[in-house]
Image (tube, rainbow, N blue to C red):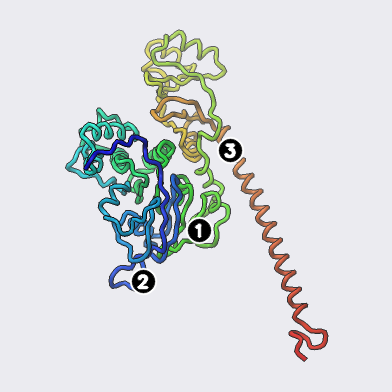
Amino acid sequence: MPETTETTPASGARIHLENLTKIYPGNPTPAVDNVNLEVKAGEIVIFVGPSGCGKSTCLKMINRLIEPTHGRIRIGDEDVTDMDPVKLRRKVGYAIQASGLFPHMTVAQNIGLVPKMIGWSKSRVRNRVEEMLDLVGLDPREFHGRYPRQLSGGQQQRVGVARALAADPPVLLMDEPFGAVDPITRDHLQDELIRLQHELHKTICFVTHDFDEAIKLGDRIAVLREQSHIAQFDTPEAILTNPTDDFVSGFVGAGAALKRLNLTRVRDVGVVEFPTAGLDDPLETIFDRLRSGSHNELLLLDRNGRPYKWLRRGDLARARESLARAGTLVQHTVSRDATLRDALEAVLTDSAGRAAVTGRRGEYIGVVDMATLMNNVHELLEADRLEAIEHQHQLQERRARQTQMEQEGLAGAGGPEGGPGGVV
């Protein structure tokens, strides 16, 4: 197969599911029944619903890991329902829970598998592997030759995402990809996916049972009932503030206002400027900044510009002996793509009520503090209160109109002589 020379990254493609149905032999009830859904190019759509509702089956029919019984699948302008499923899967990235890496292959071999299969040259595959490792925040020199068993769960998931994106597909399918890792790693992986999407603009269909994850990641959320019937397909804001029925309300659960903390990113709120110093700065320069600044502490950055230690004025005596022995190691940072909920958790666990904000490579950007976060929380709660009042007014107006129409209908139906219906 000739090697493609296209260098422009592929952006997302529209996905259109038309009357998509799956009926398994021996079971008269469809697992997925007549689903019609359109995913816009470049957006993240989350499938969320109870266990057994068919959300993973629906996802796997898009790349035909499960063959549909009826219906059509269109990706971009192409009907892929009848094309060679192997060729289709090489055009669609796929990431699953527990990464699905081949244990006998190195990290580089796993990532380079699909590019190699579609005919890329060795040098292009090699360059792509390094590019993808860097993209998901793993040092190519360190991870290139490792095997999956030598990686942590979070590292395996990053490699799994890198492999899914290696051939630059316009569409990425993700089936509970972060479900098998601990909560802290899960938060970091979610932030990584958000960051990657800002760079790549792929079309992503993502299955989860966690509604908070759906709110955090999704541009739109499809809440599915049994047989993948769509209960509501809308933005996270719309579902939180105006669920269509009790079924959807059950997924939203209590504390909808606080769940909206997952809709706002740290990049959307003001980060606070904070005094910093470098690890290689002269001690006297560091001391002068501590003494003269309005804060009683500063943030010491390592040689890569990453948060390293909080250094307080009370640490000055110990710092004269050695910076290594002074200060408190930075325990929690948040990325610019982290949600306000993530930031609030980090700030609440910090004794001084602040957390360092970092960029893509962990470099220091600023500080987010409790005052900034609480101001945003109050704004969200006030917006919810006003929206609830407006919603109540709209309900009252609708009820008043309905009552008026009913009264006018009764008056019109009764005749002057014959009573109701005008019957004599």
Q: Between 340 and 103, which is closer to the camera in this rendering? A: 103
On residue 232, which mark appears?
1
Verify CB contact (< 8 Å) between mark 2 and mark 1: no
Q: Quadrant of the N terminus?
A: top left
**Mark 2 surroundings: few (<14), some (14-19) or many (≥20) residues within 10 A:** few
**Residue 51 locus on image (x, y percent):** 38, 60
Picture layout, residue 43 above or below residue 371: below
Residue 29: assigned label: 2
Element class at badge 1 = strand
Q: Residues within 10 Å of mark 3 (few under 14, many from 20)?
A: some
Q: Which residue is mark 3?
A: 376
Whether residue 153 is visible: no
Q: Position of residue 296 (x, y in %)?
A: 53, 19
Upstream in sequence: badge 3 or badge 1? 1
Measure the C-alpha gap from mark 2 to mark 3. Answer: 48 Å
Q: Residues within 10 Å of mark 1 (few under 14, many from 20)?
A: some
- Circle 3 or circle 1, nearest the eye: 1
